[in-house]
Structure formats: structure tokens, C-alpha cells
Amino acid sequence: MAHDTTTAPLAFSFEANPSPRSTEEVAEILANPGFGNHFTDHMVQIDWTVENGWADARVIPYGPLILDPASSVLHYGQEIFEGLKVYRHADGSIWTFRPDQNAERLQRSAARLALPQLAVADFVESVRQIVKADERWVPSAPDTSLYLRPFTIANETFLGVRSAHKASYLVIASPAGAYFTGGIKPISIWLSTEYSRAGRGGTGAAKCGGNYAASLLPQEEAYRNGCAQVMFLDGETGTRIDELGGMNVFFVRNDKTVVTPELTGSILEGITRASIIQLLQDRGYTVEERAIGIDEWRAGEADGTITEVFACGTAAVITPIGQLKSHDFTIGSENSEPGEVTMSIREELTDIQYGRREDRHGWMVRVDG
Ligand code: PLP
Ligand code: COI
């Protein structure tokens, strides 16, 4: 049945996995989930056609997709995704963080990639549905969560280069521990001087697979140089800081000012970023969203005006950055301690997410029951 997104949300059917993981297996996985290694028993799928719109919303057993080899996503990379976490609170209830923001960003990504837009209510309902099906996969140990990966692929069987007339939205779920192994200690990042992640008018602000494909080679370079992440500069001048491969970045100054690169269309509009800006402003910090050059970071580090640098994102939460390495110079040091502002904002944000502190902005949405 076709679905009119202006009216009622989609109704989901449910097909139980006939061979779900055993209780013991789930317990073993949840004891040491890592990141992105294990997947739950079910997934969500909703199909779209240009003729009928979104239809056939369903929760089905997790498993391989059948894709025609001529599916457009396999050739032209017409794909977008999201990442959000589901948290278990001390009383056992299950919550997520600002899902409407992920839903709206998925819509913006869809618009840029010429893919169909799913209604916000249907996105949020898909989150509820996967949680309902796989509740037992939401871990309860400190700093663990169930990471959800909603994504949309173009799956029309057609090799012509135009936006596809068929697509599917799916949600898979993966229990998650820390993204970076080794606890909360400052990471080293690598400055990519040869490769850009985004160009003017490109897809930098969209969360599309192609952006990440382009980041993998520089990310390898980062690993080779002992760094956990790659930092990208703007594609036009190669002087301004954009973001990391999978995170936004903040600079804390010694004058109660915090600087983060402005949203110019080349960086991802991080939901963690927006939330941190709010929490900092609540504390009386001035947050400047503006261009910040690599030279400003170097000078600020040298004269002490920049006191802390941190990265943020759903997967990484808030991670202190100890040093930036490049072919020509290094900023900061490998052995620095996590900064005070970094750690206290991290604590405040995670306290809200895990229900340990008042949610004064109404960011948390209960998704069980
Ligand atoms: N920048 C990039 C390139 C990312 O992949 C992510 C992760 O989603 C972020 C920033 C942070 O976004 P968010 O805080 O919404 O997870
Ligand atoms: C996230 O933080 O959700 C991301 O998508 C970053 C990375 C895992 C791709």
C-alpha cells in the first residue's frame, strides 16, 4: 500500500527471527561488544518506489539482502546513512537522543543525494520498532549502548545515470562499547594535506557513503602514522579546519570562548556538535562558529590561548585530542592529559544520555514499552 507521509505514520509488520541468538551468546557479545562487530536478530526495511512512495514497513530477521547486480547503489553510490544510539537507564528503561535530528539530517542527505525522504515520524517509529524487536540487545554496562544504523540505498535495476526510481530504507542495530580502544585518553590525529573530504557544492554536509569512501585512503595514512583519525582541511584553500573522518572538532580557549568550524556545507552538521554548543552556552561560554585555520591552532597552542581540543560524534561521544601530526609539523603532544572542559562536558552529555542528570532541553526520547 502506498503511504501518504502527510497523514498517519506507517504501520509495521513483524516477522520474528526463527533462530535468534541464544541468551548466552547475547550475554557474551554484550560483555565485550566493541564497535560495529555484532548485529542483532532483526532489522527494519521499508521500500520506496517513485510510483507509490514508501510502503511495506516491516521488521524482519536480520540477514543478507538480495540485490540485483545492476542495482544503482552498487554503481553510482546513491546511499545515505545515520548513526544514533539507544541507552539503557538504571531503571531498565530504554531511551534515545534527539532522534528527530537524525531524521531531519537523513532528509537533508536524501535531498542532496536525490533519494526519497522518509517522514520524521516514520524514522522515529522505525527506531521504536527495532528496539521493541531486539530489546534484550540493549546493554547496561557503563558507556555501552545499542548503536543504530539507519540507511537508504537506491536499488533500481538500471545502469542509466539518473536518480533511482526504487529505494529501500533499512535499520540495523549493533551493540557498542567504546569507539576508540584504550579508554578516554587523548588521541593523535593526522592532518591530510593531500586529500580533501569535500569540495564547494559537493556532498560534505550529507551523510553519504561516498564521503567515507573518499576518507579511507587518508585514514590509512593516519593509521600508518600512529594516529586514530584523519583531519581534513577545506577543499578550496587547504588552510581551514573542516572536521575529522567521522567527528566534528572543538577548540577551547583560555578566555571562556570555544571555537568550532562553521557549517559551510562542507562538514557534517553533527548532532553532538549542536548539543555541545548548547551545553557550553548554558555554562556561560561564548561559542564561536567560524572559520579556524590550521595556523590559528598552531599559534594558539604555542602561546597557550588554545587550552583544549576535542572531537565529538555519536560513535566517539567526546574524545580529547592530544596532538595533530603532519608531514611537516606537530601540534600538541602525545602524552597530554584530557582537558577539564572536555571531560566535564563529556560527563554532562553522557549523564543526560544515561539518565543520570536532568534532561533540561528535552533531548531524550523513551523508545521502549
Ligand atoms: N562528522 C562526520 C564526518 C561524521 O561521520 C560524524 C558522525 O556521525 C560526525 C561529524 C558527528 O555527527 P553526530 O554528532 O551527529 O554523530
Ligand atoms: C557516528 O558517529 O555515528 C558515525 O557515523 C561515525 C562513524 C562511525 C562513521
Image (cartoon, rainbow, N blue to C red):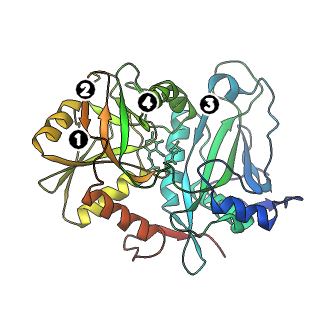
Q: Is residue 220 above or below residue 37?
A: above
Question: To which residue does mark 4 refer?
Answer: 222
Q: Secondary structure at mark 3?
A: loop
Q: What's the residue type where badge 1 is placed?
A: Arg
Gap in angstroms between the C-alphas marked 3 and 2: 38 Å
Indicate if the residue with disc 3 has its beta carbon within 8 Å of ligand 2. no
Give the label, 3 or 4, closer to the camera.
4
Mark 2 near ligand 1 (CB under 8 Å)? Answer: no
Report the disc number at residue 67. Answer: none
* Residue at mark 2: 329
- Comparing marks 1 and 4, which lies closer to the viewer? 4
Residue on which disc 3 sits: 78
Side of 106 relative to 232 (left or right): right
The picture places residue 207, in percent across and down from the top left corner, at 51, 39
Quarter of the picture holding the C terminus: bottom right
Query: The residue tagged with tag 4: helix, strand or loop?
Result: helix
As drawn, the residue found furthest toward the right would be 18
Relative to 336, 227 lies left or right: right
